Image (cartoon, rainbow, N blue to C red):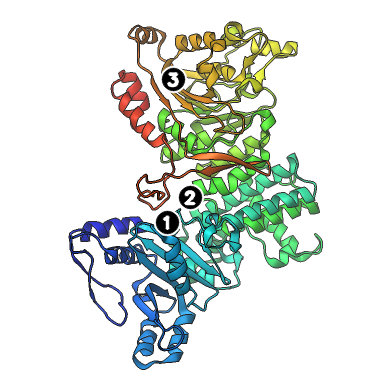
């Protein structure tokens, strides 16, 4: 049971109760009956106090033996008012005995003991975030200072709104470092106090003790369960770590194709190592019963010791131990991840090259303590994948990383299902494909997931992305230059090149051999589009290529055509009967006179299902307005019938997407925009405690699905049938 489930259980059990019998000491009292409703039978502050304690205990985050309520410590001289804690957590179950000794016998050594063993302070309010800054600064922060530990957790629970703080080496900040605008030097004004923390961010007692205990970690004996989950709490460490990796690559003159290949291969080793440890079912082994062979299966190999890191040169025994361990891991992984790793471990990596070893050492050191496999995928994308993808992407080639909210929206609209095959012809880092896989609850078969891109680095990241989410059997291919414009999958999963003399004007099924092009149930793609990325043939070869597209002959503008139209026709031609697609294009294609012929072609060949207009600058600082086109490919006779019936199209002008793009140091960053309550002006939160994003995607999905109910049966089967 997690915290949210425990909270819901408390509400269902005690929603009509007026009292609650305390399950932890309240000051010096045991089993105290606490009034949890006000005179008008509304929940009071006590209700939320015991709701929190109940959830903390029943979720398994903390055993009740370590927790107390309504405690007090003396402050200053004996005439000063004591410092009171609504709640406190200690690291030793004998705390109540010490607390009793102090308050009953004025035992000062017991008070010293309590301050040394205090690991968390909790403050409860029922003010609906009216003055969080004052409560934190004047009540919670002074209480946190009572702990003599270098680390102490501060918790403020305001009528189900959660705020987590930390004292760390005498610096007082939010626990989630993403909320500290000036890092460890943040003042109260810099702590984003309008934003709540999700309940899943509450650290367990075990995690809290890790923060406090400066222990020597034996990384050679760790399993995946010993790694930290990637969340915003570690955003600063991870961001700094990734920046350090990129700096080292630059320093050793390896910020190039070879360097990126090494980086991606080492990331693949990390994923393999974690999955190897996870699949060995560590919970089935007791530590003292583990055999050497069982330990070898369970223990992670992706680590580097201080001695291995601080080598003088590659002749040192310590660094050779590291190299041997990583090479062993590489050779284990290469038989499984053959699409990323070479069978010959020296093909990409020169294990005798100091620069190569420096990169590998840095990647391992910066990432060895965090789990990729068990982490929340959104946090992992934002903190790791997007940073590397931004580094690899090239705006001059029209590569813009598609934001996760937009990807998730289009995937939910198009509704890929378990038995279907799906392709992204401009796959990038495979976000459409990975989100489709995740949203299907892993029911999609990896072998039915396809992608092509003309950038080899993007394909490498795409392979990692699918490896992280699935079993790594997706069919992702790199073809330089024209990519999927000329290269298509055949029915044997091989890439075949269109032939200009045979395939003019979209006649792509005309082959003189037994070749048959593969047709797909779903196409999802965000291709390059807009006048800035137009296709304008300069050579005979380029003209022959574009003449294989029917839209070139009927809808081009002089001697050029929007690349978005090329990929629109490509999507249509590789769709199976009743296959459906979602494609992101320039709004001009759907609106201005220049592309009227293209729209007529589209209406003639596809059943348009939905058009979603999006605001400008949704991908980058281009100023281009975009439209999502959703359609399916019915039998021609069925399409004529639908046209005669004047079929309906769902349209929506989406203005709020939940983020804005800011460019800092030439790096595009998606900055969330939050939903504000119009009465209180507070940022609203969802049931899991997350600040709510100001977006219209969720409501639009619900509206679209309701609209589908009144459409033809084929459309209903395709777009709202269960996956």
- Identify whether 572 is placed above or below 88: above
Q: Nearer the viewer, mark 1 or mark 2?
A: 1
Is residue 229 at all visible to an observer of this figure? no
Confirm or deny contact between disc 1 and disc 2 (CB under 8 A): yes
Q: Nearer the viewer, residue 279 or 611?
A: 611
Q: Is residue 487 left or right of residue 638?
A: right
Element type where label 3 sits in the image: strand
Element type where label 1 sits in the image: helix
Q: Nearer the viewer, residue 304 or 147?
A: 147
Is residue 63 at all visible to an observer of this figure? yes
Q: Badge 3 is on which residue?
A: 631
- Image quadrant assignment for residue 366: bottom right
Q: State which quarter of the image contains the N terminus.
A: bottom left
- Identify whether 543 is placed above or below 206: above
Q: Earlier in the sequence, mark 1 or mark 2?
A: 1
- Identify whether 617 is placed above or below 217: above
Q: Residue at x 75, y 42 (%)?
A: 258
Quick one: label 2, few (<14), some, or many (20+) residues within 10 Å?
few
- Identify whether 421 is placed above or below 202: above
Quick one: label 3, few (<14), some, or many (20+) residues within 10 Å?
many
Q: State which quarter of the image contains the C terminus.
A: top left
Q: Residue at x 35, y 64 (%)?
A: 125
Q: Residue at x 54, y 26 (%)?
A: 625
Residue 98 lies, in percent from the top left, at: 39, 86
Q: Badge 2 is on which residue?
A: 376
- Image quadrant assignment for residue 416: top left
Confirm or deny contact between disc 3 and disc 2 (CB under 8 A): no
Residue 476 lies, in percent from the top left, at: 59, 32
| Number of numbered labels in the structure image | 3
Q: Earlier in the sequence, mark 3 or mark 2?
A: 2
Q: Is residue 616 left or right of residue 357?
A: left
Mark 3 vs mark 1, CA separation in Å: 38 Å
């Amino acid at each position: 049971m997690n915290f949210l489930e425990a909270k819901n259980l408390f509400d269902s059990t005690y929603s009509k109760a007026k009292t609650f019998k305390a399950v932890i000491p309240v000051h010096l009292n045991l089993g105290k009956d606490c009034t949890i409703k006000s005179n008008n039978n509304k929940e009071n502050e006590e209700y939320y106090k015991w709701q929190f304690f109940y959830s903390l205990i029943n979720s398994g985050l903390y055993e009740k033996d370590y927790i107390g309520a309504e405690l007090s410590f003396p402050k200053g001289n004996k005439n000063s008012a004591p410092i009171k804690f609504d709640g406190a957590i200690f690291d030793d179950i004998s705390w109540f005995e010490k607390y009793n000794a102090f308050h009953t016998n004025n035992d000062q050594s017991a008070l010293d003991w309590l301050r040394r063993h205090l690991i968390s302070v909790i403050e409860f309010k029922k003010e609906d975030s009216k003055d969080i800054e004052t409560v934190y600064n004047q009540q919670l922060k002074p209480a946190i200072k009572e702990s003599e530990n270098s680390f102490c957790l501060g918790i403020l629970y305001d009528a189900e709104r959660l705020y987590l703080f930390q004292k760390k080496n005498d610096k007082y900040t939010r626990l989630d470092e993403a909320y500290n605008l000036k890092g460890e030097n943040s003042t109260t004004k810099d702590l984003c106090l309008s934003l709540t923390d999700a309940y899943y961010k509450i650290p367990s007692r075990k995690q809290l003790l890790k923060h406090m205990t400066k222990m020597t970690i034996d990384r050679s004996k760790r399993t995946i369960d010993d790694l930290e989950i990637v969340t915003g709490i570690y955003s600063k460490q991870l961001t700094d770590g990734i920046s350090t990796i990129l700096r080292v690559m630059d320093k050793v003159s390896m910020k190039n194709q070879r360097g990126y290949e090494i980086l991606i291969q080492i990331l693949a080793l990390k994923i393999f190592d974690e999955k190897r440890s996870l699949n060995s079912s560590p919970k089935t082994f007791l530590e003292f019963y583990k055999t050497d062979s069982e330990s070898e299966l369970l223990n992670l190999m992706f680590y580097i010791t201080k001695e291995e890191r601080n080598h003088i040169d590659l002749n040192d025994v310590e660094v050779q131990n590291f190299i041997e361990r990583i090479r062993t891991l590489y050779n284990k992984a290469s038989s499984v991840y053959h699409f990323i790793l070479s069978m010959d471990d020296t093909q990409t990596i020169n294990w005798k090259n100091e620069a190569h070893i420096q990169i590998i050492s840095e990647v391992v050191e910066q990432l060895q303590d965090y789990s990729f496999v068990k982490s929340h995928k959104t946090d992992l994308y934002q903190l790791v994948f997007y940073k590397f993808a931004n580094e690899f992407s090239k705006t001059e080639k029209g590569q813009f990383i598609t934001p996760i909210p937009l990807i998730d929206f289009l995937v939910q609209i198009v509704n890929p299902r378990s038995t279907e095959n799906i392709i992204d012809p401009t796959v990038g880092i495979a976000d459409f494909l990975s989100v489709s896989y995740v949203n299907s609850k892993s029911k999609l078969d990896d072998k039915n997931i396809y992608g092509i891109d003309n950038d080899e680095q993007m394909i490498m990241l795409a392979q990692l992305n699918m490896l992280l989410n699935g079993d790594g059997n997706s069919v992702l291919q790199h073809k330089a230059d024209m990519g999927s414009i000329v290269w298509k999958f055949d029915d044997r999963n091989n890439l075949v090149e269109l032939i200009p003399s045979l395939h003019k004007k979209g006649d792509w099924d005309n082959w003189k051999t037994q070749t048959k092009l593969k047709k797909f149930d779903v196409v999802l793609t965000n291709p390059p589009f807009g006048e800035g990325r137009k296709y304008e043939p300069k050579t005979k070869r380029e003209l022959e290529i574009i003449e294989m597209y029917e839209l070139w002959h009927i809808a081009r503008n002089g001697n050029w055509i929007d690349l978005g139209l090329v990929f629109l026709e490509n999507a249509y031609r590789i769709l199976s009967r009743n296959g459906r697609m979602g494609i992101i294009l320039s709004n001009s294609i759907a609106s201005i006179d220049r592309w009227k012929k293209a729209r007529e072609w589209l209406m003639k060949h596809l059943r348009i299902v939905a058009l979603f207009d999006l605001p400008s600058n949704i991908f980058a600082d281009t100023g281009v307005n975009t439209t999502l086109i959703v359609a399916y490919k019915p039998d021609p006779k069925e399409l004529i019938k639908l046209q005669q019936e004047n079929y309906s199209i769902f349209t929506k002008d989406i203005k709020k997407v939940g983020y804005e793009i800011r460019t800092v140091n030439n790096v595009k960053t998606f900055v969330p925009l939050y939903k504000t309550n119009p009465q209180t002006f507070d940022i609203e939160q969802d049931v899991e405690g997350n600040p709510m994003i100001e977006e219209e995607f969720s409501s639009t999905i619900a509206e679209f699905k309701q609209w589908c109910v009144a459409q033809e049966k084929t459309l209903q089967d395709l777009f709202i049938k269960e996956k």
